[in-house]
Image (tube, helix red, strand yellow):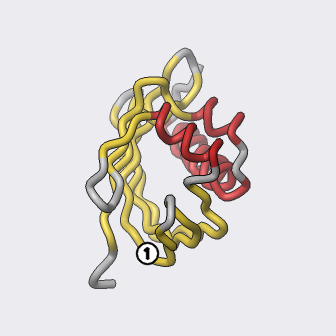
Amino acid sequence: MITDQSERKTQIVDCEKKLLKAFEKKDLTVIDEMLHDDALFVYPNGQKVTKAMVMENYKTGNSEMTSITSSDQIISLIEDTAVVSINLALEGKYFDQTIKSEFRYIRVWKLVDEAWKVIAVSGVPMVNK
């Protein structure tokens, strides 16, 4: 059982690293494990997406991140929920669109059966750095 706030923050930092690496390496097993089945996403283009859609896009090759660099991570813990705000420099593709931009993401993690799961993600383009 996780009880210490600093331990929880460390675990969230580790989860973030593991998730971003999984997206970059297209490790569908890890992605599936870390995303809650009912997770919701809002992409920087405003598109609403479910976990099933994310998984399908990676399986079919419609989504592919070849490089992910993170910075300026802020973590707020509220009981069994963590809110992460992070800058991500992404390179890859989404369907036929090439991506090479910086975004600010907010990702919400929830402790479910003693494992951290992503339950919500939203991103916006970085226009003024």
Q: Residue at x 53, y 33 (%)?
A: 35
Secondary structure at badge 1 equals: strand
Residue denoted by label 1 = 102
User: Which of 82/91 is in front?
Assistant: 91
Q: Is residue 47 above or below residue 56?
A: below
User: Which of 75/57 is in front?
Assistant: 57
Label 1 Cα crowd, 10 Å radius (few <14 / some 14-19 / many 20+): many
Instruction: Tell me where residue 102 appears, x and y as whole percent.
Output: 43, 75
Instruction: Tell me where residue 111 appears, x and y as whole percent.
Output: 48, 25
Q: Is residue 80 above or below residue 53?
A: above
Instruction: Tell me where residue 8 appears, x and y as whole percent.
Output: 53, 38
Instruction: Tell me where residue 49 appears, x and y as whole percent.
Output: 37, 41
User: Which of 45/2 is in front?
Assistant: 45
- Give the residue type that dot 1 points to: Glu
Q: Residue at x 49, y 31 (%)?
A: 52
Q: Residue at x 60, y 41 (%)?
A: 11
Q: Quadrant of residue 33 in the image?
A: top right
Q: Quadrant of residue 40 in the image?
A: top left
Q: Quadrant of residue 87 in the image?
A: bottom left
Residue 112 visible? The answer is yes
